[in-house]
């Protein structure tokens, strides 16, 4: 089974592709075997469907907050919810999220899933900065088309497992310094040093996920990518490796709200 860490974008291009880190766990060490880049969503979908067995930790939310779902009177079962969301355009989803915000007072405008705050992730209903709701809208249907199993949420192919991941959770457990920016002029020496610090901690296994990462061959590529996309894919791969070690224990997932989903490795 391929282990994959997916740094996802809802609008891939040559400048900003979907980046996938692949690897395997051997002798309590995660070995990075390479990177794949996809400049269209169709290319990424084709790769998922072509590979017979994988565990993919994906940097995109798999669902929305229950409070938002109930406020809109949307379906309360996950498969029905996703089917409903697929019938909405991106603009309609943005409008639905904005309507919730507009109807709530300051400090309560965004609903959160139970996993968002402990992971430190943005509310999955945000449609801008970052547009994670749009990432959900674009990415989850691709996983469903590949007949993925989303543990605790959706049964699909038993050898195609998709887990929600959040690379920022891992990065911030090492340093709170900014380590990436998509704008070239903001890809500073300080951010480069932060990437080096994060990568070295991964190589030494000095995170609370206690998994050493063997990535020496690709270290320079990871460090020199000022966008952080390759590092984010590796951070997601770390969570895939951690989950793989717990494959006989529901991939390390706790009991959680099956409508909202859960971020792999959160609360470790």
Image: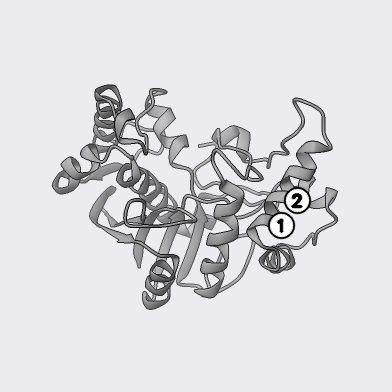
In the picture of the structure, the residue carrying the numbered disc 1 is 92
Question: What is the residue that sits farthest to the left in this orientation?
Answer: 217
Q: Position of residue 84 (x, y in %)?
A: 73, 66
**Rendered position, 266 above or below 38:** above
**Rendered position, 2 above or below 230:** below
Q: Position of residue 168 (x, y in %)?
A: 45, 36
Helix, strand or loop status at disc 2: helix
Residue 208 picture quarter = top left
Q: Residues within 10 Å of mark 2 (few under 14, many from 20)?
A: some
Q: Residue at x 29, y 58 (%)?
A: 24
Q: Position of residue 39 (x, y in %)?
A: 36, 62
Q: Position of residue 98 (x, y in %)?
A: 73, 43
**Camera-nearest residue between 151 and 181:** 181
Instruction: Tell me whether the residue at label 2 lies in contact with that at label 1, contact meaning CB atoms closer than 8 angstroms.
Output: yes
In the picture of the structure, the residue carrying the numbered disc 2 is 96
Q: Residue at x 50, y 61 (%)?
A: 162
């Amino acid at each position: 089974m391929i282990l994959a860490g997916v740094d996802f974008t809802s609008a891939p291009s040559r400048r900003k592709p979907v980046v996938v880190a692949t690897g395997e766990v051997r002798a309590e060490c995660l070995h990075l075997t390479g990177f794949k880049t996809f400049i269209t969503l169709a290319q990424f979908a084709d790769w998922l469907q072509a590979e017979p067995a994988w565990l993919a930790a994906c940097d995109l939310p798999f669902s929305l907050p229950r409070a938002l779902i109930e406020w809109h009177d949307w379906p309360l079962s996950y498969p029905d919810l996703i089917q409903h969301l697929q019938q909405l355009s991106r603009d309609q989803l943005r409008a639905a999220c904005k309507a919730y915000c507009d109807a709530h007072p300051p400090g309560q405008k965004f609903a959160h899933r139970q996993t968002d705050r402990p992971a430190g992730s943005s509310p999955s209903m945000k449609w801008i900065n970052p547009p994670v709701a749009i990432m959900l809208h674009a990415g989850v249907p691709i996983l469903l088309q590949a007949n993925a199993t989303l543990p605790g949420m959706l049964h699909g192919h038993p050898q195609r497992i998709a887990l929600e991941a959040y690379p920022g959770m891992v990065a911030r457990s090492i340093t709170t310094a900014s380590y990436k920016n998509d704008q070239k002029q903001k890809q500073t020496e300080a951010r480069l040093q932060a990437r080096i610090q994060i990568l070295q901690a991964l190589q030494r296994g000095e995170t609370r996920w206690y998994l050493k990462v063997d990535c020496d061959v690709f270290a320079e590529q990871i460090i020199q990518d000022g966008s952080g996309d390759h590092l984010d894919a590796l951070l997601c791969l770390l969570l895939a490796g951690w989950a793989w070690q717990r494959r006989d224990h529901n991939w390390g997932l706790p009991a959680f709200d099956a409508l909202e989903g859960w971020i792999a490795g959160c609360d470790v």
